[in-house]
Image (cartoon, grey):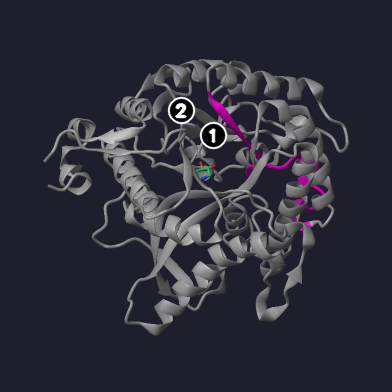
Amino acid sequence: MNKQEKLQFPSGFLWGTATSSHQVEGNNTNNQWWRFEQKPGKIWHGDRSGLACDWWRHAEVDFDLMQTLGLSAHRLSVEWSRIEPTPGRFDHAAIDRYREMLDGLRRRGMTTMVTLHHFTNPLWLEDRGGWENPEVVTRFQHYVRFTVNALRDLCEMWVTINEPLVYVAQGWVRGIWPPEKVSPLGVLRVFRHMMQAHGVAYQTIHACAPDAQVGYAMPVRVFQPANPQRWLDRKAAGLKRYLAEHVWFMAAIDGKIRFPFGFDDYNHPLRESVDFVGINFYTRDLVRFRPDPRLLFGEEHFHPDGEFSDAGWRGVYSEYAPQALNQIVREVSVFGKPIYITENGLPDHDDDQRPRWLLGHLHQLHRSMQTGADVRGFFHWTFTDNFEWSEGWGLRFGLIELDPQTQARRPRRSAYLYRDIARDNAITAALTAHYAPELLPVLFPA
Ligand code: IFM
């Protein structure tokens, strides 16, 4: 093996991390997730977001650490319930704090990406029917206009909505996140309103900031039939891919919101409404047919011989399948848009898997780029351990370990690996030998 070999990334490639407001800011008392957390039995171990990572007061502690590690970008979300705490009343103090945070990132040499909706809604919106109520589209537009006008000099890249599919699936298919419904009609309503809101937000952002780059972050899983010989498994996996990926991606390209039985809905603002595609990738799924519409006729499970992250046994996370990232990136490339990996990571409390998983995924990403995929950046989920929704503090995704009680931080070994990759803009054989020698033959075959 030639120790000089390296997997070089293009100049200007962004090496960042990603967070969301509710998961890091602390004391986000005015949204539906805070209210949900107070109900007994909803969050694993009865955890609450509480002070989270205390970013509302002290995000700069982590920004300093990012700078020390030499990261070149950060993706954060702004909290609608802080910016518009009651309908039509915008809070300038909240916007000032976001300005301070974005400015702080830029002064530390980082490119900023801002997400406008990441699962949380103001209570006033939720109590009027939230994303089921058609008025949400106009409400979202007002909030987006105010926010983008106020922050446009500090951010060029905007994600309108994070993981709309996850939001719908958890809230209206599985019914385990607020508003805890199992409602096929609700699914269709929310799907429609989220796509419309994305289209309107795209136009609004461009009207406020013509040079902005706008996209949305899609949770992409690679659904494969559990038994490829079984017709029903193949159909169930195909249906999931169609519903989970195709209808969402295509809507933002051709403006058609695809409903069952051909009841399609054309929406002009939605046409050509992405400047980049954001991919959140964590795992692949095997799909076994089940005659249960709540499961969309397919039960998802992991490969019996797969390697799993923490809590793989809970069916939550994740199977090590980095080649699926390569596959997805190549498939998404057909849309001809730049791609950002807006999230990728794993829960791994003791950090015994993360270095290898990180290298394995970046290797596959590099391979996809070698075949022509236009990938511009990678945002690791996440920087500091944070509040992981229904899993509370039980899952630790951070490069930096956090004790939520004391707010003490300790960089994990992976943080130094990521620092070295960002510094070299490359994965070297020496780095691989140091952090995950077992991957040397895979990344640098003789
Ligand atoms: O923490 C979440 C994030 O909010 C959305 N994408 C997946 C992450 C890990 O589960």
- Location of residue 403 with respect to 192 vertically, above or below: above
As drawn, is 328 to the left or to the right of 442?
A: right
Q: Residue at x 48, y 27 (%)?
A: 72
* Residue that extends furthest to the right in the rendered view of this protein: 88
Q: Is residue 240 left or right of residue 414?
A: right
Earlier-in-chain disc, 1 versus 2: 1
Residue 420 lies, in percent from the top left, at 32, 26
Task: Read off the residue under disc 1.
Answer: 19
- Whether residue 161 can be seen here: no
Give the residue type at disc 2: Thr
Q: Residue at x 35, y 27 (%)?
A: 415
How far separated are the C-alphas under marks 1 and 2?
A: 9 Å
Residue 127 highlighted magenta (yes or no): yes
Quarter of the picture containing the N terminus is top left
Q: Nearer the viewer, residue 175 or 166?
A: 166
Mark 1 touches mark 2? (CB < 8 Å): yes
SS assignment at label 2: loop
